[in-house]
Image (cartoon, rainbow, N blue to C red):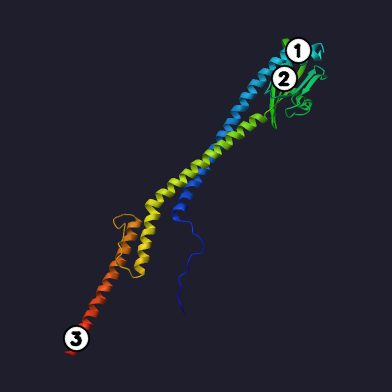
Amino acid sequence: MSNSTSQPSGRAISIGLKAALATAVPVLLGIAALVAIQVQNLKSTIYQEAEGSTVTIVQLMADQMAGGVKWGKAEVVDKVYADLAAQPGNEMSDVLVLNKDGALVTQFADEVLTNAGDLSGYVTAVAGELANGKIITRQVGQHLLVAAPIAPGGERIGTLAMAWDLSRLEALARAEMWKGALFGIVIAGMVVGVVAFFLKRSVTGPIRTVTGVMTTLAEGDNSVDVPHIERGDEIGRMANAVLAFKQAALEKQRVEAEAVTRREEAEAERRQ
């Protein structure tokens, strides 16, 4: 029955690379979590600012179109939002204006932006809050919906509902997310590189050197020097174990050489 030493198949991942990857993975996960939190905070900030500005705009428009709504003059109402609708970069996608009886005064749907659809359902859903004089905002999909009572002097004469396309803000948040992800990948790559370099110099390199000496000794070459014996860590203990193996091999060679010498001397004496 023969004994055989099994050899690893394929290319094994080095200890240094494993340690570097083990270090980089939690770093990358931490950065990913941080980026996600920052992006969410950015989105919240952007939406809050957008909500604040749109509420102000809707409130001003509701006041400006009160006369047109009261007298049913759609052309007067249209002029209130026409300039805003014509501005480049405008995000107002839909406008719905109703009189106090809920009848349509005018409506608008931007031809470029994504439309929110019929806003009358939204007005119906928030009718109770509008009756209390509140301006109501809701985010539905990629739109911010705002409904406000048209109530000059406190008497409600109609309702203004508007939708604002938030796709540009969504794109901005996604761009920031990708920037953060790229930053995280770069940092993780740097961590892998630094850890791998450090481990190669302080761990895997010395281990490879010591194992090379062990192989040389196993092949019968006892003249090789054993490095790193001065280290006080595990590698130093490994090196000293190899040194002990070398010294034992040298002692064995010495004993064998002395035995050969004694045999030769004994044979020489017998021949005399």
Q: Is residue 231 left or right of residue 134?
A: left
Q: Is residue 202 above or below residue 225?
A: above
The residue sitting at 64% across, 32% down in the picture is 170
- Mark pair 2, 3: CA separation: 120 Å
Dot 2 or dot 3, earlier in sequence: 2
Element class at badge 1: helix
Q: Is residue 202 above or below residue 131?
A: below
In this figure, what is the number of numbered marks?
3
Most extreme residue toward the bottom, as rendered? 271
Q: Nearer the viewer, residue 166 or 186?
A: 186
Residue 147 coordinates in the image, percent (x, y): 72, 22
Question: Is residue 156 among what the camera can see?
Answer: no
The residue sitting at 55% across, 37% down in the picture is 180
Amino acid at circle 2 = Ala
- Name the residue carrying label 2: 86
Q: Is residue 24 left or right of residue 36?
A: left
Q: In which image quadrant can residue 144 be found? A: top right
- Name the residue carrying label 3: 268
Most extreme residue toward the left, as rendered? 272
Amino acid at circle 3 = Ala
